[in-house]
Image (spheres, grey):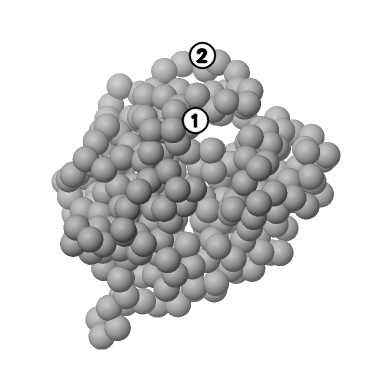
Amino acid sequence: MRTVIIDTDAGSDDLMAIAFLLSRPDFHVEAITIANGMAHVPAGGRNVLRLLELAGRRDVPVYLGRESPLSGNVEFPAEWRRNSDELPGVMLPEAHRAAESRPAEEFLSKRLADTARPVQILELSPMTNLAAALKSAPRAARTVRQIVIMGGAVGVAGNLGDGGVYKTDNTASEWNMFVDPAAAKIVFDSGAPIRLVPLDATQRVPIDMALFEQFQARASTPLARFVAQVLATNRDFIRQGFYFAWDPLAAAALANPAVATFRPKAIDVSDKPEELGRTIEIKKRRPNMQVAVDADSLRFREVFMTALGVR
């Protein structure tokens, strides 16, 4: 049984990644922390609690993080945030409990300082919560078994302009890094063992109509039916070839690293206004993480669908 803490901004692809790990009998989801990002923190917490209710996992505590980045005031587009808050087209039961009273930062800093219980972290959001915890307890980075992060664009273009909703000249940055680059830099410089799953890998794993149709026809468990509903709300993007396994690929890479090809690299985060949040490879620096430079779409599908019982 492998223990994992999930830090998430509760976008729809985050929720699919969480559903995947909740479906794996070899994983124990110890806690979920909510970061500011796709969903607003209170709404994201409610939706994660509802997903846990669906999964029958009232034992998993949910902690709410701060509602702004460590620095700056960048936000995801309002329309995206509203959809993440409201989850139109997705049916989830109401939760019978509330989020924990302790803030996410406090929980993480104390939990990661427990050297007797090393833990893995799946980071699916801007890294505000994790960075704040590591900043207050720097030694905690040494007790983390690994941090698997979905974010960045190392050798490919960024995604700030996807869909034409956000107008910017920054074509290099990815959203999770762009929202809180100061937090990303703290985590990258912490010395913790990191596996980064950037757009370089996720764009190799499109969610296409064939996968969509398999979920619609064969989803038989509550969590699989939930994923099928999420995919149905994104049918148009899937049909047009614009929908990828962003956070689900990171979750699958945590469970089975063979779904991606990793290479050691030294990665920094830019704070320059014109390329804010850009993930830059520093060729002459000692590597600080393993970076997914490619991914195996067929292996991902096998791992992801098998866990959810869709065959």
Q: Bin the neighbour count of mark 2 within 10 Å (Cα to Cα): few under 14, some 14-19, many 20 and up.
A: few
Element type at marker 1? helix
Residue type pointed to by label 2: His
Element type at marker 2? loop
The residue positioned 49% from the left and 48% from the top of the image is 163
Above or below, 189 against 220 in this view is: below
Query: Is residue 174 left or right of 256 when viewed as pictured?
Result: left
Residue type pointed to by label 1: Asn
Above or below, 127 against 75 in this view is: below
Percent across and percent down for residue 78 are 38, 33
Q: Circle 2 is placed at which residue position? A: 96
Can you tell which quarter of the image residue 104 is in? Answer: top left
Q: Circle 1 is placed at which residue position? A: 83
Above or below, 218 against 250 in this view is: above
Can you tell which quarter of the image residue 278 is in? Answer: bottom left
The residue at the far bottom in this view is 284
Query: Is residue 248 left or right of 183 when viewed as pictured?
Result: right
Q: How many marks?
A: 2
